[in-house]
Amino acid sequence: MYQGSTNTRNSIWQGIDWFTIALFLIISLIGWVNIYGACYTFEQSSIFSFSNPAGKQFVWIMSALVLGFVILLIDEKVYDVLGYIFYAIVIVVLLVTPFLAHDVKGSLSWISLGPISLQPAEFAKCFTAIAIAKYMSRYGYEVRSWRDLVVPAMLMAVPMLIIMVWQRETGTALVFAAFILVFYTQGMSGKILGYGFLAVAVVVLVLKLQIIPDEWLSKVFQPHQKARIEVVLGIREDPMGYGYNVAQSLIAIGSGRFLGKGYLQGTQTKLSFVPEQHTDFIFCTVGEEWGFVGTFIVIALYVTLIIRILMLAQRQRDTFSQIYAYSVACILLVHFTINIGMVLGLLPVIGIPLPFFSYGGSQFWGFTILLFILLRLDGSRVNKLY
Amino acid sequence: MISNKYYNRAYVIGGIVIAVALIFIGRLFYLQVIDSSTKDKADGNALVRQPIYPSRGLIYDRNDSLLVFNQSVYDVMVVVREMKSGFDTLSFCEALQLTRDQFEARMNEVTNRNRNRGYSPYTPQLFMSMLTKEDVANLQEQLYSFAGVSVRKRTLRDYRYPAAAHIVGSVGEVNRKDLERDNYYIIGDYSGRDGIEKQYETYLRGQKGVEVLMRDSKGRIQGSYHNGELDYPAQSGTDLHLTIDIRLQLLAEQLLSGKMGSAVAIEPSTGEVLAMVSAPAWDPHTLVGRQRSKNYTALLNDSHKPLMNRAVQAQYSPGSTFKLIQSLVGLQTGAIKPTTMYGCNGKLSQPIRCTHSHGSPVSLESAIEQSCNPYYWQAYRDILEQHGYGPRNATFRRTYDSWRDMVVSFGFAGKFDSDIRDQATGSIPRAKTYSKIYGETGWRAITIRSLSIGQGEIQVTPLQLANEAACIANSGYYLTPHLVRPLPDMPKVVRHRTMVDSVHFGVVKRGMARVMTNGTGRHYSVPELNMCGKTGTVQNSHGKDHAIFIGFAPLDNPKIAVAVVVENAGFGATWACPIATLMMEQYLTDSISRPELFDHLSNTQLITP
């Protein structure tokens, strides 16, 4: 009897990579506990109370778990088959967002749905990854010259530009550069990667040294865009005080020393009002309260998670899943690098969250979808025959 | 496993991950294990970021006379968490001249999250606001002994004159919407709430500075952090020059005191608003400081609606002042000529009777002089009927709309794209609107005859009336009326042509000059100033007629165009005309030759206070 024809589907639960799920849960839990710490004042008692953002984050985490469970139940073929349609829908939503958005500190990326606010840009990463994976896994596709990368680069650039120019949310847009690393894993010349790094360095240097006359820049950029670029490059200090935030953050982390001050004992992160304390600057709460031990563990957890995903990528049997897996790894890598680099004063202040860790429903849901689609794709690889 | 010749590239990415992590761990090891300077800083020291408030831009009038400036006030701030150990409440109360009960009550208010939404025991909270220098002098001397207490210097607005409140507007605390929309503001900041203060907020406010200070474990300031490396100086706001002439403004406000109404004066050659008065008004001093909200509520509840800027928000039928527009449109369309004569039967005229007695038939100039209603009814009928009615009234409706377009080109039925806030649009119905009411074929010139004399469905604002006078003074164009001399980075003032050619304006201007020598305005004219004008008396459903006057002076090369409306006063010639001629005289000669007229008008109360 021909054995192959039986092809009975394995239970989805057998194929799931529980190791990744465990990492995901540990990171989320540590994040949640630290959000509570960052916003803790002595009058508040419960970690579930809505007056502390941790209470809301708990709801986001729980709902994300349900969402993740649902994703695991959905047939994985959906993503390959409907990839472009998902992508088109996301682009339309991104375009429409500024019309519905309420202006939050100059950015037009937040939509209110009743009591909750969502940032569609956080979901765009996932569906861009699917579209790029679909295109690059076409039969016979191979990166032979730069021409083969024109379409994937467009798929990357369109949401990036919409988010940067139209929604005025530069930080989130920059994350899309992660896909350049994905192109590299699929055969883009390492030279291009090298030149890319070089080009960024040159542009930064040219702007930083202010070689280009001011009037030229004023013709290309709106005043607020120019100001933002100057702030990011450190030419101009932001009057709202990002320089102050970083100084505070360094003192807080440094004062944690080797073992930290103990949970909820950090004074530095509380004694002065830093608005991003529980979102983009959450890592400095870890540094203050858990010390070097805490920061080391958190960094180790992220390194393990990203390397685990790279391993998943290598073991995929179809190109679509593989490219998607690389996308997830690279997106997480970029977030991890920019966020912690910013908190440690190594990179300019670019407001993007630490995945699964910072407070915020959109980013938590966005990353959960990103990760669980990968787990679903990976879980069913055993059913694919080659 | 799929064959992939780039399999090894995953290791490159993995290598990047490890490299980044190693850099981070190295940095953390340095910060948290090796370098102990941060520990010293944090060991009891915390950073405080104190905003440095810039002084708000000053406001001058057109002749560089200072109108709005700043006064210093002081806020007492407390950080509740730092006050707890051994706080000397008694001497604190003494320094601020508070009783113990007042202190407790105020502290309860500060720490009650329902009353003070932004409360946090870690950040400075407003304890008492807007104190004078004398009030805080005692406290400031002993400030070092009160941990957690600081004094913040702020500036409030002050005014040279109790005038121009509607124009300048006021400054108040930002609300939650402002905070969301503009990250420049933090809770407790002030911003322009209305008028020029709001319109030019981004110019006037300047740029806040920041001072980063270190404080010790007891909350006492130790000095600046990193030698002020993170500090930024504040930049003062930009000064503004209004186009207003404050002497003219003051005169007009006095003339309109005790009345409901408004006056607007414009320099025709520039569109600069010389005066803009809405009565009743308030003294801008009353909306400053601790009394602001109480006084604002009183103004809000006043039945005379003083907060409404009648000069731009009140809408009236223009009455006989609209006859000037009818004349010009009639000449432009060719329906009438300067020599065209129409008959007038005085009080017996049909369908609109004449309110003045004069000879018959009348020419255009005499019709303006005598404000002859029958002339304008017949002229309007001829404008609208000159191409006939056409099938299903279509030609007539088209003619009506082209009449409307010409009228609108004088600045009616729309807002000026200008720094004048809260303008009402006014309205002149389209043919569509009448067709909706009467059916497409159900209306003719006779149906809308009230429009011929500026009654009926036409609504205009006093600003639009002043602009009408400016259009005529300029013989066919106007510059957008505005209140502030543009700064270099603001758009230039735009010149708008009316749809009536300049050749037609001479006869209308001569008619307006005759109004002031022989007609309804003759009693209040100043002959050597060659004034031109037109009175109007507007029937309305809310009591006595509104008195209206528009005019300009002098006839050749006009320097000022005015419109005055006095609500429920009676004849335009009796109430609005003298106010307008006094204003023109004041502006042109910098004096008034008729003090008894001034006294009489400014002492007349037409509303009960």
Image (cartoon, rainbow, N blue to C red):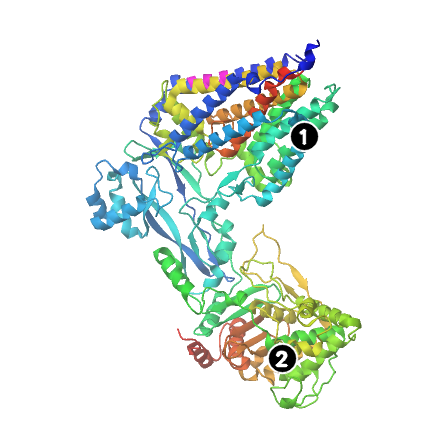
Same-chain check, marks 2 and 1: no
Q: Nearer the viewer, residue A332 or B316?
A: A332
Residue A209 painted magenta? no
Badge 2 marks a residue whose secondary structure is helix
From the top left corner, tell me how far across and down residue A244 is, in percent: 43, 33
Residue B513 circle label: 2
From the top left corner, tell me how far across and down residue B547 is, in percent: 53, 77
How many marks the image carries: the answer is: 2
Looking at the figure, which quarter contains the C terminus of chain A?
A: top right
Residue A82 circle label: 1
Badge 1 marks a residue whose secondary structure is loop
Instruction: Measure how far apart labels 2 and 1 are at the Cα level.
Output: 79 Å
From the top left corner, tell me how far across and down residue B153 is, in percent: 35, 47
Q: Residues within 10 Å of mark 2 (few under 14, many from 20)?
A: many
The secondary structure that dominates the magenta segment is helix
Residue B562 circle label: none
Name above or below for residue B366 compared with residue A4. Answer: below
Looking at the figure, which quarter contains the N terminus of chain A?
A: top right
Q: Residue furthest top?
A: A1
Q: Is residue B576 left or right of residue A218?
A: left
What segment is highlighted magenta in the picture?
Answer: B21-29
Q: Amino acid at mark 1?
A: Leu
The answer to whether any part of residue A234 appears in the image is: no
Chain for disc number 2: B
Q: Amino acid at mark 2?
A: Ala
